[in-house]
Image: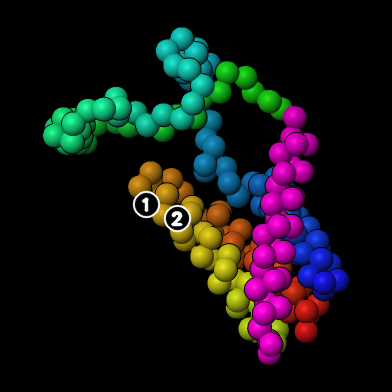
């Protein structure tokens, strides 16, 4: 049990540290939050026209028939579209988000440790490959699959997966041997 807890805590902190570098110091995720000089007028327009929520524009209202939806989609082919995540106020306090992120990382690595400890024979190479594979499963089934439909860049997320789960795999391969 001690190996599970220490492995999870240190691995979760390692993953969190990499994410801090990736998002903050290295700024790898900039392509997913670009600046526009029109941001003030866009936000003013949004504030006047929508409630907080997540929007796919253009879209049909709920309850339209599949024939109407198909006709609408055909009429929109080749036209502009957007995804909007709209919030009424910008919360600049990051402490709650950072705590939640760290806790999620610790729980994630706890689950990874539990899986690794089920393997009776493991070596450094197997541990790194299994760690990397589990991270890649998360990337492919979540972030990358969404990017197929909504066309956003994911290279930084792939780098996060490779480096983050590679570091954790190296740690766990050393610690759990």
Seen in the picture, residue 114 relative to 16 is either above or below; the reply is below
Quadrant of the rendered structure where residue 16 is?
A: bottom right
Q: Which mark is residue 148?
A: 1
Q: Position of residue 159 (x, y in %)?
A: 58, 60
Badge 1: residue crowd in 10 Å (few <14, some 14–19, many ≥20): few
**Is residue 132 shown left or right of residue 100?**
left
Q: Which mark is residue 144?
A: 2
- Check residue 95 for magenta coloring: yes
Q: Position of residue 96 (x, y in %)?
A: 75, 36
User: Can I make out residue 177 in this image?
Assistant: yes
Quadrant of the rendered structure where residue 80 is?
A: top left
**Of residues 32 and 62, which is closer to you in this image?**
62
Q: Residue at x 70, y 84 (%)?
A: 124
For the stretch drawn in magenta, what is the main secondary structure? helix
- Check residue 171 for magenta coloring: no
Q: CA distance from mark 2 to mark 1?
A: 6 Å
Q: Residue at x 53, y 66 (%)?
A: 136
Q: Position of residue 77 (x, y in %)?
A: 20, 36
Seen in the picture, residue 62 relative to 102 is either above or below; the reply is above
Residue numbers of the magenta segment: 93-122
Badge 2: residue crowd in 10 Å (few <14, some 14–19, many ≥20): many
Q: Residue at x 76, y 73 (%)?
A: 171
Q: Position of residue 92 (x, y in %)?
A: 71, 27
Element under disc 1:
helix
**Is residue 76 shown left or right of residue 136?**
left
């Amino acid at each position: 049990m001690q190996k599970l807890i220490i492995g999870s805590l240190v691995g979760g902190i390692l993953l969190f540290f990499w994410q801090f570098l990736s998002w903050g110091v290295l700024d790898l995720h900039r392509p997913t939050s670009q600046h526009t000089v029109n941001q003030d007028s866009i936000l003013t327009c949004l504030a006047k026209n929508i409630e907080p929520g997540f929007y796919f524009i253009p879209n049909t209202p709920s309850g339209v028939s599949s024939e109407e939806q198909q006709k609408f989609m055909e009429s929109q082919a080749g036209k502009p579209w957007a995804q909007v995540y709209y919030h009424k106020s910008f919360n600049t306090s990051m402490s709650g988000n950072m705590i939640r992120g760290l806790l999620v990382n610790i729980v994630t690595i706890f689950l990874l440790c539990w899986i690794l400890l089920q393997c009776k024979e493991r070596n450094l190479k197997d541990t790194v490959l299994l760690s990397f594979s589990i991270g890649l499963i998360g990337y492919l089934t979540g972030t990358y699959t969404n990017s197929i439909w909504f066309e956003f860049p994911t290279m930084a997320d792939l780098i996060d997966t490779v480096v983050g789960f590679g570091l954790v795999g190296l740690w766990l391969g050393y610690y759990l041997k």
